[in-house]
Image (tube, rainbow, N blue to C red):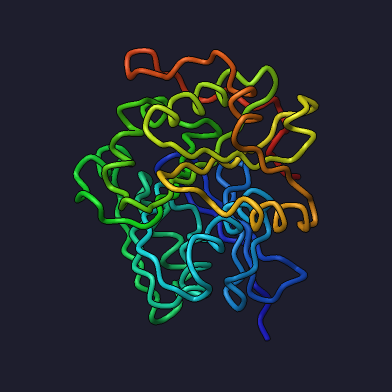
Amino acid sequence: MSESLPVTRAVGHGTAKLMPDVDRERAWLLTVDGAPQSYVDLDEPAHLEFEYIRRLGHVLDTLAEPGHPLDALHLGGGALTLPRYLAATRPGSRQDVVEFDRELLDLVAEQLPLPKGADVTLHAADARAWLEAAPDASADVLVADVFGGSRVPAHLTSVAYAREAARVLRADGVYLGNLADAAPFAFLRSQLATLGTVFEELVLIAEPGVLRGRRFGNAVLAAAHRPLDIAALARRAAADVFPARVEHGAALRDFTGGARPVRDADAVPSPEPPDGTFGIG
């Protein structure tokens, strides 16, 4: 059997590299300019390698009965890890993926093809522009995992953006965002305040060391107009190889404190990670 070889290609926003995992036969790590973006196992699409992706997966697992298909909108493409996961765990799901970097989409589609039968439509477009043109009440879940380099773009952080997300979601739909921050959490708190102007229910999932201010890291934010299954989420997060805490209700309101919602005019990207935070090698 021939050995899988790395693939390196210039894409719209940097240099993308696909590297085979020596421990898993058809698994690949995608990096852009050295920063890990996605990990996929073509033979086992339900395998989620990255911690924050598993936490997004925990929420997706609890949104409906096991196996029940969902209409999903993904802002940010990467190697299409979560679309593959939903196609495997919830067959029949209809999914749209919006990725600004067309060359990156082309590379992933060519080198890491989606499984047959996966109803996933790829769109090369700006996430907010595409969202603003999307139909009302057309998605059960919206997953926002958009980074320009290693920062969330400013125009995806405001109340106006959150209102568009809520408009596209159905009444019982759920918004999921991957954010990154460190103490004193000015960005994360502002995002909680921003989403709290639109959604009644907010849930934060993060590794305890991040929440205690010990290091920069990812935090998964879920927002909805309906209660989420906190007990099920807490069980999954606690049982992970890297356990996470689930914060909601009064504790999350205390964490948010006096943070103010973000207006388009005031919006800034998420903070720059410290050197080496997400790099490899």
The one of 213 and 43 positioned closer to us in this rendering: 213
Q: Is residue 269 above or below residue 130?
A: above
Q: Residue at x 50, y 58 (%)?
A: 79
Q: Is residue 40 above or below residue 252?
A: below
Q: Is residue 170 above or below residue 114?
A: above
Q: Hey, which quadrant is residue 45 in on the image?
A: bottom right
Q: Residue at x 44, y 59 (%)?
A: 107
Q: Is 264 positioned to the left or the right of 64 in the image?
A: left
Look at the image and tell me in which quarter the N terminus lies.
bottom right
Farthest residue toward the bottom? Answer: 1
Q: Residue at x 48, y 32 (%)?
A: 152
Look at the image and tell me in which quarter the C terminus lies.
top right
Residue 146 lies, in percent from the top left, at 46, 41
Residue 14 lies, in percent from the top left, at 49, 40
Q: Is 45 positioned to the left or the right of 171 in the image?
A: right
Q: Is residue 217 above or below residue 262?
A: below
Residue 208 lies, in percent from the top left, at 77, 37
